[in-house]
Amino acid sequence: MNKEITGTTWTVYDGNTLTQNEIYGMTLCELGEKHPDIVGLSADLAKSTKIGIFQEKFPDRFINVGIAEQNMFGIAAGLARTGLLPFVSTMAAFTSMRAAEQVRTDICYQNLNVKIIATHGGVSFGSAGTTHHATEDIAIMRSFANMTVIVPADGIETANAVRAAVDWPGPVYIRTGRGFEPNYYTSEDYGFTIGKSVEIRQGTDITIIASGITVLQAAEAADFLKKNHGLSVRVINMHTIKPIDKEAIIKAVTETRRIITFEEHNVIGGLGTAVADVIAQSGKGCAFTKVGFPDVYSEVGYPEDLYAYYKLDANGIIEKVQQVMQKDFEEDENWDDEF
């Protein structure tokens, strides 16, 4: 699917040469040609978040409010009330904390059709320090009624999420990294649907449920464990945190009895908590572990170093899976087993 965007021909299959956020910016331009009601907003970060690509293509449909994130989300709410479709982009830390009240009250409370693309999620801007890390944003956003929360695995999945968000009613929060994360997918045609996870590795011994940058790492870890240890590791890309795919989680619990979650987020309130809620409500027992940032403010450094430090890279996932595999249970249907 070739598109001519501001003089540049591209396809989503060029993902290895484009950043995650460049792909979303180009996808938004593609959608802007089809949907004249789409407007873009930035808080003086159009270049950093790549929504500036849309600004170049549609200058009359773009508003830069300056360094005033709270005002930006209030303006987006007003535009949505007039029937327009605002796409708002700023860093995840600013969206979820600096402008939390406006997102909650102006947008979610009124269930307005505002799409938020929050960049620099997790520790992808690691060297910028704790003020620019976003390790609480998923917990905050999934607690807001009416909000849909999506954490794409890579640029190609981000493009799919942005397209799907256009037709999805109500507010949507799409969380991306700084943009330099490697792709997992090589094609956009793998069946992306909001609220439905994607099983990228089959397995019967243990299930890894991952989101964002950990999806690629989990797939590589599963391949290593199968080849070198004979482990059958199921890997689920849980790209939508809210509404979460309960059916896939219960199926994994029933068939593998061991579940481990990986996320670039605090272990409190994010993917792991969402999965744990489903398991607890099901009444079924399993060996369960959630891995992310512990209840601390993350260290400062290059993202790759931080992923390794917090066991979110392939080596860390391999180590954690082997630990959970030590937890045993009786091979029967007694869901009251203790581990």
Image: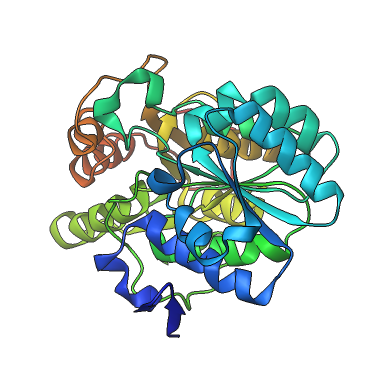
Q: Quadrant of the C terminus?
A: top left
Q: Is residue 87 above or below residue 291?
A: below
- Indicate left or right for 205 with 188 as reference: left
Front in this rendered view, residue 253 or 44: 44
- Indicate left or right for 102 with 298 as reference: right
Q: Residue 141: which quarter of the image?
A: top right
Q: Quadrant of the N terminus?
A: bottom left
Q: Is residue 99 above or below residue 47?
A: above
Q: Is residue 305 above or below residue 89?
A: above
Q: Residue 125: which quarter of the image?
A: top left
> Residue at 23% across / 61% down in the picture?
223
> Residue at 23% across / 30% down in the picture?
306
x, y percent for residue 264: 39, 36
Front in this rendered view, residue 130 or 268: 130
x, y percent for residue 3: 45, 81
Q: Residue 97: which quarter of the image?
A: top right
> Residue at 74% across / 29% down in the picture?
104
Query: Furthest residue to the top?
Result: 296
x, y percent for residue 101: 70, 23
Front in this rendered view, residue 196 or 124: 124
Q: Is residue 140 visible?
A: yes
x, y percent for residue 119: 45, 43
How does the figure colour the protein chain or chains? Answer: rainbow
